[in-house]
Amino acid sequence: MRRGQTILGVLLLAVLALAPARAAGLLLARVDLPFPEAMVQLQDSIVHQGYTIARVQRVNAGLKANGYTTAPYQIVFFAKPAEMRALPALDPQIAAYLPLSIVIFAERHHTLILTTDPAEIATLFPQRALQPHFAEWAQDVRAIFRAVRRSGR
């Protein structure tokens, strides 16, 4: 299990390295639920905010296939399909940030959720037409995090 924790730590550092350097650019929450229940709450909260789950990447399954054992570790990708189609026309580089994603992983008796704050990503795109989308995403992601945290109480 020690090896799995090391691998999970390295993966978390990789996620953080891809995110903006300032810690203020990340949103992180500890949820007092076991991983399976937290995953259900996360997906339900995403759908409740009006998003569609695009896919779930089971990172730990890929690691296991390569001989590593880790705690459950997944990435939930989500978006509003109309935005996914329309926004790249405003700036093709935004496609690299879509769909939105939240990392979820088990940590002992808790679950952690982590994402880059959409308000931080907004600083990379000065186009006025995109700013309302980033503001809405930032508000929605915070609501998702609140709902998942509340479910663990």
Image (spheres, helix red, strand yellow):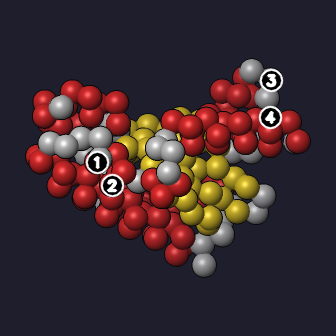
Is disc 4 placed on a helix, strand or loop? loop
Name which residue lies at 87% across and 42% down: 1
> What's the amino acid at mark 3?
Gly
Q: Position of residue 141 (x, y in %)?
A: 38, 59
Q: Which residue is disc 4 drawn over? A: 69
> What's the amino acid at mark 1?
Ala
- Does residue 13 appear anywhere in the picture? yes
Crowding around mark 2 (Cα neighbors within 10 Å: few <14, some 14 to 19, many 20+) is some
Name which residue lies at 34% across and 30% down: 96
- Which one is closest to the eye, mark 3 or mark 2? 2
> What's the amino acid at mark 2?
Ala
Q: Which residue is disc 2 drawn over? A: 119
The residues tagged by marks 2 and 4 sit, at their Cα atoms, a distance apart of 34 Å
Name which residue lies at 64% across and 40% down: 13
> What numbered label is drawn on residue 76?
none
Of 36 and 16, the residue lying toward us: 16
The residues tagged by marks 1 and 2 sit, at their Cα atoms, a distance apart of 5 Å
Name which residue lies at 67% across and 31% down: 61
The residues tagged by marks 4 and 3 sit, at their Cα atoms, a distance apart of 7 Å
Farthest residue in the front direction? 22
Crowding around mark 3 (Cα neighbors within 10 Å: few <14, some 14 to 19, many 20+) is few
